[in-house]
Amino acid sequence: MINNKKVAVIGAGLSGLCFTKYINQIGNLEPTIFEKTNDIGGVWSNSLSRKSWDNLNLNTNQLSMSFSDFLFKNQFPNKEEIYPSNKTFYEYLKSYVENFELIDYIKFNSNVIKIEKIVVVDENESKWKWKVIWELNNNNNTNNNNNNNNNNNNNNNNQSIVNSELFDYVVICTGAFSKSSIKNDLEIKLKQFKGDIIHSENYRNSETLKGKKVLVVGSSFSACEIANDICDDVSKCIQIGHENFYALKTFLPNEVGKHIPWDMLFFIRELIYEKNDNNKSDQELWEISKKLFIQLCPNQDLSKNPNSKIPIKTTPVNQPPIGFTLSRNYIENVESGKIITITGDNYKIKSVNDDGNSITFSNDNGEINTVDNIDSIIVCSGYQMEFPFLENDVLEEICYDPKDQFLPMCIYEHTFPCKFKSIAFIGCVKGVFFTEIEMYCRWVSLVFSGKLEYPNNEKLIKGKNELLKLRSLRPRPQFPIVDCIYHCDKIAKEIGCLPDFESIKINDPELYNKLWNGFFCQASYNLVGPFSNPTLAKEIINNYYENYQLFKK
């Protein structure tokens, strides 16, 4: 057994908090969370560096956004409450921290500036350790509840204190939204623009945009939702994007025509296994998705709506589907003209004209459009993942490419590198769902605490090569991980917490029906294996099933 070893956790967002909770449950590692802001929550925090705007509601329902052993306070949300606001979700995370007593493990306002590998001799044996060097900002140290008794302090009374400490393990939980990303060619073109330019990460509300003509650049989630948020207040809202995404509504019709949360339609184990268990090729799975998406987006189907303002151009059979977005009323605002779209066929900004406020757009078909008198631009070009504190050999080991927003690193299950076996990454992948984050937290906590073996070299190398192959694919799917539940079941089997569905089917048909035919519940992974709590798990599974039935009927 490994005793009294220390683990540094970089980031107090979802991954960092959840991992620390699991480490504490095991009890033989001492965690320290380094958080560069003065608040918990990462993207969802109340700090100035948050990435969410005032009116943002989650586009995944609260049941899908709950930890497996901790429900929201409101356990039976209605249709208006099922997609929590960012404020509600932040309060949920605060409650999680309080419930599992995590606050004292967090060093707030502590910006990690370097993580170095150090060889130390311990009981006549040489071992790798990690020297974490961080900068403590005293000017904004309002929430730091930790006692900073660390060595190598270099005082600067007015600005910061630099500290360092040795750790046995490091877990990187900085997420997929490290730094806003604007491509160089776009940045160069926009230098001539005389109005205001902000990135979506700095957008908070439409107050300063009222009465203005605003251009939103992008066609994915943030672009569509920000266009939605401002279109009632601005004089004109124009959206430009490379392609038209499937604009799914957050409530979709089920088999009897009842509109239910979209994930209650998709996240059913029976349907997912039916799709994945018949050895279908990627191409076959892509075609299934394309047919389903166009059925759910009739306003974008030119055969049904020839005058669609954001028509879908179906990709060839050997290519993945165009991406999708989720919104309650985006498509209605486009069709009504509140949002004017210049999207599809690789539309992009061609130039800013001499007056500094007129912009010309062009696409691959040679079509050209010019919009005059633009006051403000909101750039929704995504984020790039960055690890400025890691040494070059670690970055090389994880195949780090900061310019690749789709797959900036390639390691086994986006988590375990081959060479350095005392560092792991959690949640540092685009489009990862809440359940996947929690599964990664469980997995890493079990491995680093010595309860599970580190994945073997064959798995590590195979997983790395599969992601390198995916990175080279053109065109690419929207997200690296295609099917959340199938993927989580795979990890659960590795951990030892996947229920034996066939046994449950025989011995407890009612539970089996809820697990197999009901809305997916992450508490199913708490029925058996490490961290299991069958009594609590069944209570939560029952809660999910009751919610599912209420929405379904």
Image (cartoon, grey):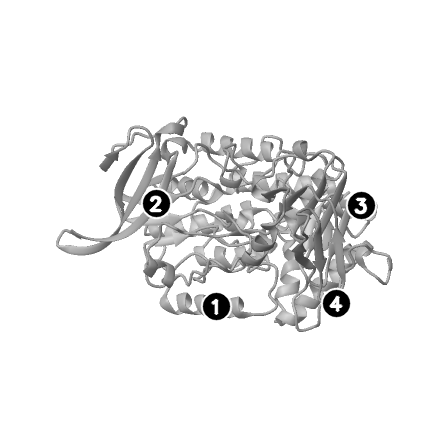
Which residue is under mark 3? 332
Q: Earlier in the sequence, mark 3 or mark 1?
A: 3
C-beta proximity under 8 Å, tags 3 and 1: no
Q: Earlier in the sequence, mark 2 or mark 4?
A: 2
Instruction: Give the residue type that dot 2 points to.
Output: Ile
Between the C-alphas of marks 3 and 2, the distance is: 46 Å
Q: Residue at x 83, y 56 (%)?
A: 308
Q: Quadrant of the C terminus?
A: top right
Q: Residues within 10 Å of mark 1 (few under 14, many from 20)?
A: some
Instruction: Give the residue type that dot 4 points to.
Output: Asn
Between the C-alphas of marks 3 and 1, the distance is: 40 Å
Which residue is under mark 1? 468
C-beta proximity under 8 Å, tags 4 and 3: no
Q: Position of residue 34 (x, y in %)?
A: 37, 39
Between the C-alphas of marks 1 and 2, the distance is: 28 Å
Which residue is under mark 2? 113
| Left or right of 246 in this view: 94 | left
| Left or right of 169 in this view: 337 | right
Q: Earlier in the sequence, mark 4 or mark 3?
A: 3
Between the C-alphas of marks 4 and 3, the distance is: 27 Å
Q: Residue at x 62, y 31 (%)?
A: 74
Q: Residue at x 70, y 72 (%)?
A: 317
C-beta proximity under 8 Å, tags 2 and 4: no
